[in-house]
Amino acid sequence: MTAQAVEESEDDQDEREREFAAVIGLEVHVQLEADTKIFCGCSTASTTEPNTNVCPTCLGLPGALPVLNEAAIDAALKLGKAIDAEVPDRTRFHRKNYYYPDLPKNFQITQYDAPICVDGGLEVRVEGDSREIGITRAHLEEDPGSLQHARDGRQTSVDAAEYTRVDYNRAGIPLMEIVTEPDFRSPAEVRGFLSKLESVLEYLGIFDAGRDGSLRIDANISMVPEREVGADGSISAEGLASANRTEVKNISSHKGAQKALAYEVTRQRNALQRGREVEQETRHWDESRGVTISMRTKEAEADYRYFAEADLPPLEVAGRAKEIEIPELPDARRERFAREYGLGQEAASKLTSTKAVADFYERMTAEFDPDLAATWVADEFLGELNYRDMEIEDVDSRLGEFRRLIELVDEDELTSKNATTVLREMLDEGEEPESIIEREGLGKAENEEVSAAVEAAIEDNPEAVADYENGEEGAINFLMGQVMRETDGSADPGSVNEMLRARLDG
Ligand code: ADP
Ligand code: ZN
Ligand code: MG
């Protein structure tokens, strides 16, 4: 392509982006960490043995009654506090009726007109811009069971399946459904929101990101004419209502959300540009193929015949909401790190991105200089993990080894450059720092060896010494070169420089 052609296609793209703006709202299901299910005493522990964490209540057997788990309420109230939501005086549960084999009662206990949290928000930062995303409501509900489609005893897709098995271990796991306002203007903002939300949930200690299916996302998306968007990003109610939107289901990760929405933005924009309408419909995100597929079913609310759950009394939660305490959250911790440890905003953000990272950094500051710890944790350690698509949780049991690596740098046993090499090998080979250093000879030359080389350099080069004494700074570089050669480059240049000066100036 010629330069001109590139420019033109970029112009075209700009123009297209100017015509329509993406409007996105989320419904996020998060699994709340509690020892037992929301309406019975069954364990929520992961197990590979199907239908073992079950009882008459979560199997929906006749006559079995639900008993609300206090821990789920507390988790919901903590989240409410963290997102600055209002907790109404009274909250209650409803039955959402539908028939599906993973739902043994043929209804799901959820919340409808009196959810436990309303009117909250969460600040997201994307590329330096900070925006407030409104949270319409967040309510408690029970998870259905899970279906496994199989053929010849092996799991497969629903289309290829011969039969389907159902596992009720998941039925009754406490979930929180968080519904946002249609405040997102790009897939990148959605991704930023999801990481922020996940981080807040982890800080609160009510969420385990590592658990399979702990985060499930439905994303609503429409395209509205750019002229409907105000300078502050707001869109009129009519603008929102008049745009046909799709609901994309089956998204299970931040990355998946960003990809699915980017796909939908392009698909809808292309349809509109060709003068076609966007169908109002539910679509399925096919992760492996990277496309959304029409499911052509959008249930209306009336289809669910919501009615009040008579087996659970309304709940007065306002008092408990006031009492409940929450720990320091990511934003507050970021500000404190910046203040207390003298970090820049970027380093402070990185170091508080997850609770595990922040905890590790803070432990390191107790022993080492905060700047040194920040460089090693934020730049080196997180950088190398990120490069390998790993999280700090993946090396949870090895944090002591990383501490020792920082210690070796701190005690001048290892140059920074060599420490980076050691870090990479630690991650790639699973080895401990000391054995890598020994095998590869990466340790700083023994002090005696360096001092001997310094002595020899001074003795053998009287002219350079005389030059230095006559104020010729450059002579020190020559002497350093001699020492480095003598020690096969393993000596730390900074300390050789210091040692030479100490000897010559003394
Ligand atoms: P429904 O009754 O169809 O479930 P809701 O009003 O409950 O609709 O909204 C469901 C989700 O759709 C919310 O996350 C909301 O932010 C989002 N939403 C509403 N209007 C739009 C729109 N024009 N474009 C994209 N998302 C929207
Ligand atoms: Zn049970
Ligand atoms: Mg709705």
Image (cartoon, helix red, strand yellow):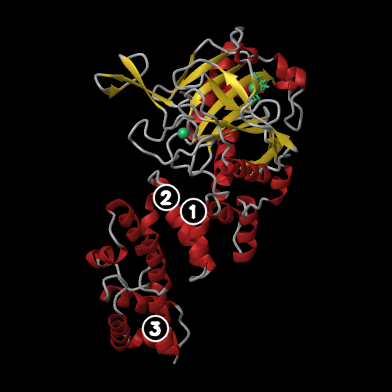
Q: Which residue is rendered at x = 56% and y = 40% of the image?
A: 69
Q: Nearer the viewer, residue 254 or 464?
A: 254
In this figure, which residue is indicated by the disc labeled 1?
356
Residue 126 seen from this side: no
Determine the secondary structure under disc 1: helix
Q: Position of residue 280 (x, y in %)?
A: 60, 12
- Which numbered disc flags the more N-terminal residue, 2 or 1? 1
- Which numbered disc flags the more N-terminal residue, 2 or 3? 2
Disc 2 to disc 3, C-alpha distance: 45 Å
In this figure, which residue is indicated by the disc labeled 3?
500
In this figure, which residue is indicated by the disc labeled 2?
393
Residue 114 seen from this side: yes
| Dot 2 amino acid type | Glu
Q: Nearer the viewer, residue 309 or 130?
A: 309
Vertical relation: 267 (above or below) 384: above
Q: Nearer the viewer, mark 3 or mark 1?
A: 1
Disc 3 to disc 1, C-alpha distance: 43 Å
| Dot 1 amino acid type | Ala
Determine the secondary structure under disc 3: helix
Q: Which residue is rendered at x = 35% and y = 79% of the image?
A: 479
Most distant residue in the top direction: 276
Is the residue under label 1 in contact with that under label 2 (CB below 8 Å)?
yes
| Dot 3 amino acid type | Leu
